[in-house]
Amino acid sequence: MVDYFADNKHTAIDFRSTMTQQLEAFLPYLTGNLLTTLIAIKGVLGPAELAGNAPFSGPDGLALDKAFGRLDWGYGSFDTRVWLGVVLSLPHHPVLTAKELRLICEVVDPLAIVALDDTAHNLLSAAFVSTEEGFLADFTPGAQTWVLGRHLVSVRGFEAALADEAAKQRAWAQLKRCTPPSPR
């Protein structure tokens, strides 16, 4: 067997550095692990972000850490997130465009992308719509689809749902559609 890393002990670090350089303009919008297989996107800022804190630093980030762990994506915490969070807007920053969101997704190359509210759903849909290639033929809020080998899941109002038990159960049912690929 060939050891591809034998000549370069820093390959993983160099890869992360390269990704960081490619995503440098978007780093304020990101939180978590760039070398992930799962991206969560939110378009509506919560109280934590509006107060100037890091993306997903509020109860939604903690809930997603637990939820993704229960869904077998891996457990983490704010300091050791196993997923990448993307917010579409920040105070005093321009709003991300569909093209920029698509670029982030292509650089990270996740297995799954979760839109956590209607704003995120709409921009994710716009990022992957192609009339020539026929992407996203039917991707409605609260639904799921496969695009370019990625599982796209839409959840209706995740952060707002945390305050209401019935809404939280509906959001959890939608989030459960985001399961990692099973080993063969």
Image (cartoon, rainbow, N blue to C red):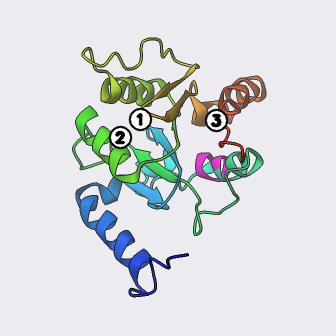
Asked if the residues shown at circle 1 and circle 2 are in contact, with their CB atoms under 8 angstroms apart, the answer is yes
Q: Is residue 69 magenta?
A: no
| Residue 171, placed above or below residue 62 | above
Q: Which of marks 3 and 2 is nearer the N terminus?
A: 2
| Residue 106, placed above or below residue 3 | above
The range drawn in magenta is 60-64
In the picture, which quadrant includes the C terminus? top right
Give the quadrant of residue 172.
top right
The three-letter code of the residue at mark 2 reads Leu
Q: Which of marks 1 and 3 is nearer the N terminus?
A: 1
* Structural distance between the alpha carbons of marks 1 and 2: 5 Å
* Structural distance between the alpha carbons of marks 3 and 2: 20 Å
Main SS, magenta residues: helix
Q: What residue is drawn where x is 37% and y is 44%? A: 105
Q: Residues within 10 Å of mark 2 (few under 14, many from 20)?
A: many
Which of the labelled discs sits on residue 88, or is there none? 2
Of residue 108 and residue 92, the one placed in the foreground of this image is 108
Q: What residue is drawn where x is 43% and y is 53%? A: 51
Q: What residue is drawn where x is 33% and y is 58%? A: 28
The residue under label 1 is 43
Q: What element carries label 3?
A: loop
Asked if the residues shown at circle 1 and circle 3 are in contact, with their CB atoms under 8 angstroms apart, the answer is no
x, y percent for residue 134 = 34, 15
Q: Which of marks 1 and 2 is nearer the N terminus?
A: 1
The residue under label 3 is 178
Q: How crowded is mark 1: few (under 14 residues within 10 Å), some or many (20 or more)?
A: many
Q: Is residue 108 visible?
A: yes
Of residue 165 and residue 4, the one placed in the foreground of this image is 4
The three-letter code of the residue at mark 1 reads Gly
Left or right for 76, reference 87: right
| Residue 35, placed above or below residue 138 | below
